[in-house]
Amino acid sequence: MGAPQKTAGGNNAYHNFYNDFLHIKDLKERRRLALAEVDRAPFGWYHVRAIAVAGVGFFTDSYDIFTVSLLTLMLGIVYYPGEGKMPTTSDTAIKLATSAGTVIGQVGFGAAADIFGRKNMYGLELLFIIFATLAQALTSGSPSINIVGIIIFWRVLMGVGIGGDYPLSSIITSEFATTKWRGAMMGAVFAMQGLGQLAAAFVMLFVTLGFKKSLEAAPTLAACTGDCAVAVDKMWRTVIGFGAVPGCIALYYRLTIPETPRYTFDVKRDIEQAQDDIEAFKTGQPKGKPDESTRIATQQEAEKQIEIPKASWSDFFRHYSKRKNAMLLAGTALSWCFLDIAYYGVSLNNATILNVIGYSTTGAKNTYEILYNTAVGNLIIVLAGAVPGYWVTVFTVDTVGRKPIQFMGFGILTILFVVMGFAYKHLSPHALLAIFVLAQFFFNFGPNSTTFIVPGEVFPTRYRSTSHGLSAAMGKIGSIIGQGAIAPLRTRGASKGNPNPWMNHVLEIYALFMLLGVGTTFLIPETKRKTLEELAGEYDMSGEEEAQTNDTTVTENKTEAPTTSAAVNV
C-alpha cells in the first residue's frame, strides 16, 4: 500500500488533526489518537477562532430572523398609507416564511452533511443567506406583484440558508471541540444569536435617530406619508441589508475548513482523501488529486478494521427502530418544538407586544417617538434579558450540566407565563416589560441554548447532522404553530378600543407548552464531560487506561516524525 496522503482543508480556525497521525499504519489506532487529540486539547485561542467562525453565522441568522418584527412594522407604514400597519394575515405570512424555509434547510442541509460531508456543505448555506438578504433589501412591489409576496419569497430562500446553519455549525463545533469545554464552545456559538439580536436593535435605533427630522412630521403611523414614508422605506432596507455584512466576513473560513476527523474515519472511511502534495493546500486550492491506488487500498483496509456500521437507509431505520434511540430523538425534537412555540411566538412579535402593553405608544406624540420607543424597548429586552441569558449558559453548562439547566428553564418559564397570563390585566406596562425581560433571560439560560447543544452531542457521527436537523426542524415547526396558530389568537374578538383582547390567553397557552417541555426533558441524557463516542454508544477508544498503554507502544515503535501535540501523551 502506498504512503498515506494528506486530506484537504485546514486554516487558522480549524486545524486538520487527521494529518498529524499519517505515520501510524493501524487505522483504528490512528483514529483513536486523532480523536484523543481533539478531545483532550486544552482550551485556547484556536478554539476561540473556531467559535468566532461558526458564531458569525449565528449572528447573521439571528439578526435576519429577529428584524422581522421591525420589518413588518415599517412595511406597514410604507405600503399601507392611511392605515400605518399591514393586515394581520400579511404580517403573519412574512414571519412564517423564514421558519418555513428554515425547516427545509435544517432537514436538507442536515442530511446532506451526513451524505456529502461537513466540509462540502459548510459555507453554501451562508451563500444562500447573503444572496437572499441583499435581494430582499433591494426588492420592491409593482402593479402586478405585491411587495408582501416578494418579501415572502426571499425570506423563504433566506430561511433555507439559516436552517442549514443550525446542524452544520452545531456538529462541526461539537466534532472539533475539546470534551471538557464542548458545551461552552457550542453555547458560545449559539450565544452569537443574542449579539445578532442586539445588533438589530442598535441598527434600528441608529436609523431612527438618523431620520428623526422626517419622522417627527407625522403625528401617527397612519399619517406617515411623503418624506416620512420615504425615510421609513430607506430605514427598512438599511436594517435588512446590514444583515449580509457579517456573513461575508466568515465566508472564506467556512469554505476552507477541513473535514472533521470523526466524519473522515467513521463515515467516509476515505482515509486517504488525498492531494498529490501539500502544496495544493498551501496555495489555497480546496482539494488535491488523490492517488487512486493508495486510496482504494486504504478504503478496503478500513472496511476490515473500522467496526462502526456504515450509514445507509436500512441502517438509519434500524438504528431508530430501537426504542432507546427513538426516545432520544423524540426528547431532543419535542423539547425544541415546545420551546419554539412560545419563544418565537413571543420573540418575533416584540414590536407588537411592546405596542400591546403600551410601552411603545404610551405618551408618543409622533412616528419618530413610536419607532424610537420600539427600538429602545427591543434594546432593553435583548440587553437585559437575552444576551445575559446566553452567556450565563456558556459559563455554567459544563459544570451545572445541560439537563438541569433545561429543567430549570422550562420550570421558571412556566411560572412566568402563568403570571403574565393570569395577572395580565392587573399589571402595569412596566411590570409586564420586566416579566417579559425575565422570560427572555430564562429562555436563553435554559432550553433555547440546551436544545441546540444536546442534539449535536448525543447521536452517532454517521447520523449526527441528520438527527440535529430533524430536531431543529421540529423546533421550527413549533415556531410556525406559535406564530401562525397561537399568536394571532390575541386579536380574537378585537374592537377599536381593544385590538388584542386575547393576549392574556395566548400567554396562558404558552405556559402549557413550557410545562410540556419539562416532561420531554426527562427523555434526554446528561452529556457534560463525556466523549461523543461514549454518548453515541459507540466503542470509545479514548479511555484513559487504554490510551496510556497504546501511547507508550506507539512512542516506542514510532520511526517517523512525532505528533504535533503532547495532549495524547497522557
Image (cartoon, helix red, strand yellow):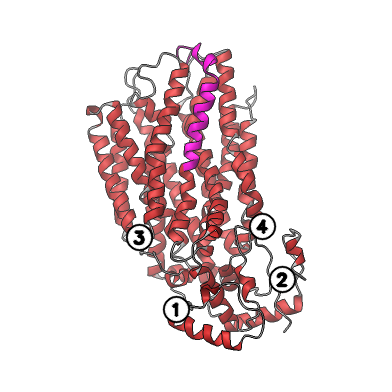
Residues packed near mark 2 inside 10 Å, few (<14), some (14 to 19) or many (20 plus): many
513 or 11: nearer the viewer: 11
Q: Earlier in the sequence, mark 4 or mark 2?
A: 4
Q: Which residue is mark 4?
A: 256
The residue type indicated by label 1 comes to Gly
Marks 2/3: CA–CA distance: 40 Å
Left or right of residue 565: residue 525: left
Left or right of residue 449: residue 283: right
The residue type indicated by label 3 comes to Gly
- The disc label shown at residue 368, or none: none
For residue 201: magenta? yes
The residue type indicated by label 4 comes to Thr
292 or 5: nearer the viewer: 5
Marks 1/4: CA–CA distance: 32 Å
105 or 420: nearer the viewer: 420
Q: Earlier in the sequence, mark 1 or mark 4?
A: 4
The nearer-to-camera label among 1 and 2 is 1
Quadrant of image for the N terminus: bottom right
Q: Which residue is mark 3?
A: 401
Q: Which residue is mark 1?
A: 543
- Magenta span covers which residues? 195-222
Tell me the residue at 41%/37% (across/down).
383
Residue 115 drawn at (x, y percent): 60, 64
The residue type indicated by label 2 comes to Ala
